[in-house]
Amino acid sequence: MKNSPGVEIDNVLEGSIAQSAGLLRGDTILSVNGCRVSDDIDLMFHGNDPELALLVKRKGKSVSVNVNRADSTLSDLGIVTRPFKIKTCRNKCVFCFVAQLPRGLRRTLYVKDEDYRMSFLYGNYITLTNLSDSDKNRIVKQKLSPLYLSVHSTNPAIRSRMLGNPDAADIMKELKYLAGKRIGMHTQIVLCPGYNDGEALVSTLRDLYRFYPHVMSIAVVPVGLTSNRNIPMQPLGRDDAAAALETVHRFQTRFKRKHGEHIVFAADELYIKAGIALPPLEKYDDLPQIENGVGMTSLFSSMAKKISIPPGREGEGKRFLTFTGVSFYPYLSKFAAKIVKAGYNLEAVPVENEFFGKSVTVTGLLTGRDIIRTLSGIVKKGNILLIPDVVMREGDDIFLDDISRQDIEEKLGVKAVVIGADPKGLVEAVTRGIWPPV
């Protein structure tokens, strides 16, 4: 499905450059300084000049709008645009998480994104299996770098098997092309036992290193399997995780000695599965793949050690509860104990994932139903429930299963507040007392 020409404005911010120039909600920007635009990236690419001549479609008519931001301190125009239609994935990956979702979730969760624009803008991982020549030309012309790429294996046979796509392009050729055009790449390997582990993992790491420094980082993450899967695959076991970590550490040592940075990293979950202590924060360089679950736990622990907690008065004030996934619970409970020792009434609770299956242990995939089920016998009237923001849809108070924060309050009979999922967010929540009594 093709996108409609231009970029439609969904909202114009009060006091913005766009409002001063006369842009309106519902306007469609067709061109900037004579250059056609089709999405937000085009606006970013063509809209950097101090003076902009916009061709706008308004109620079926073409209108010229001049924007002068030379004397403005605002960094952007002050518009919110309607999202573009996303290119979807044609692969049938053996580990596809979307294919393992149960029915009844919100529709957007079933969209299999495979769009280089989303990769550049938001760090979404793509496989490079649906790029046209014009897409490649645009990536190079507009310097859409870095991109986030799912590699999994550099062996064509293994990769095609994992992607469920016998026509998948040779990833080495694609990487060579992008590296030759100086496009930065953050890459990931979803580790699947019997597919791309062992010597196949070693080979893939060697191949990816050939494109350093354009391949800026490599993440090795364990396959995520839910109880709804119909695919014949074994979850990553303790020995599998330990073997993968041994490989990653060997390459890290080599890369650090030669380049001063580690380049390849293992997801936190690999250490937890293997029962091996997580590395200190400095082992993750500048945290290039933290959104991929790489270094999050070490960052939390480092912040927890440094944060100052104002003393409270034990036994006074509200009782707070918070929760987390099973894998992160030991780290959160240790910090919660520090807060309690400072004089605050806080309890951290682990929540098992019944919705996706108990093998799914990360906090970000907890649902409202499982939280209600777990906390229903623990919370009491007058308690305040602190909800880490990683379990909510971005910009909304909605869980994966469309349960809302208000639903949680009604079902549990408590005040529920969304907080930052870091030590600062938790400390501020229990020390500021900014919420009215329940």
Image (cartoon, grey):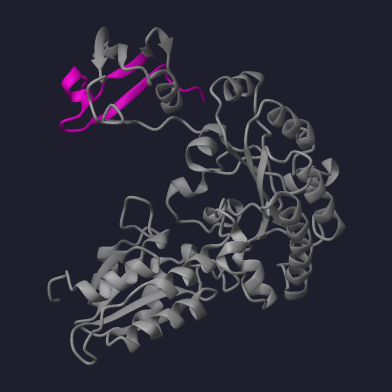
**In the rendered image of this protein, does residue 269 appear above or below residue 118?**
below
Front in this rendered view, residue 430 or 273: 430
What x and y, as percent, mark residue 44? 41, 25
Q: Is residue 118 above or below residue 404?
A: above
Position of residue 345 relative to residue 203, above or below, is below
Q: Is residue 226 visible?
A: no
Decide which of 327, 59 is in the foreground and name it: 327
Query: 380 or 302: nearer the eye?
Result: 302
The magenta segment? 1-30
Q: Residue at x 39, y 18 (%)?
A: 6
Residue 233 location in percent, x, y? 74, 62
Task: Report the number of discs.
Answer: 0
Where 21 falls versus 312 (above or below)?
A: above
229 falls in the magenta region? no
Q: Looking at this rendering, what residue extends furthest in the bottom direction? A: 315
Write the residue at 20% across / 72% down.
Answer: 432
The residue at 32%/83% (across/down) is 346
Horizontal side, residue 15 vs residue 422: left or right: left
Q: Quadrant of residue 389?
A: bottom left
Measured from the top left, where is residue 11 in percent x and y?
A: 24, 31
Question: In the picture, residue 392 is in which quadrant?
Answer: bottom left
- Image quadrant occupied by the C terminus: bottom left
Q: Is residue 23 left or right of residue 143?
A: left
- As rendered, which of 197 and 143 lies closer to the eye? 143
Magenta segment includes 13: yes
Q: Is residue 319 in view?
A: yes
Instruction: Give me the residue at 52% from left, 68% from top.
Output: 297
Give left or right: position of 392 versus 412.
right
Residue 209 placement (x, y as % from top left): 76, 45
Q: What is the quadrant of residue 166 in the picture? A: top right
